[in-house]
Image: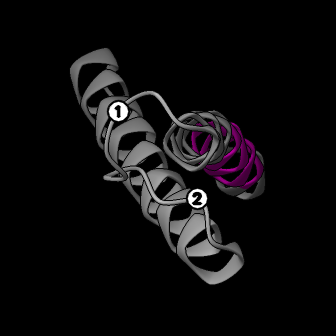
Amino acid sequence: MPPERSSWSARIVDALGFVAGSLGGFWVGQLIGLDLFAPGYSVPALGGVILIGLGAGLGRRFARQWRDRKQDEA
């Protein structure tokens, strides 16, 4: 695979993993009562921010692992 294509696919996979993980963190926060959009710097607001950040990082990591596995199979 040409380097331009692999770097392009790597960026797309990273972005999709980041967005999916962020949305997952957001919805988990909503389910347990940690709302990113709560007023002020309250515990629910900061908890929501933390969950979204953790979700984004984990989503990107899992997406990279998936991409690396697929490249090893090919």
Q: Is residue 10 above or below residue 38?
A: above
Kindly identify which residue carries mark 1. Answer: 40
For image coordinates 62% across by 71% down, the residue present is: 33
Residue 62: in magenta span? yes
Which mark is on residue 68?
none
Does residue 33 appear left or right of residue 42 in this picture? right
Q: Pick whichever, 33 or 67, lies toward us.
A: 33
Q: Is residue 14 above or below residue 38?
A: above
For image coordinates 45% across by 27% down, the residue present is: 41
Q: Secondary structure at mark 1?
A: loop
Q: Pick whichever, 41 or 5, lies toward us.
A: 41
> Which segment did they paint magenta?
58-69
Give the x, y percent position of residue 47: 64, 42
Predominant secondary structure, magenta span = helix
Q: Amino acid at mark 1?
A: Gly
Location of residue 40 (image quadrant) = top left
Q: Amino acid at mark 2?
A: Gly
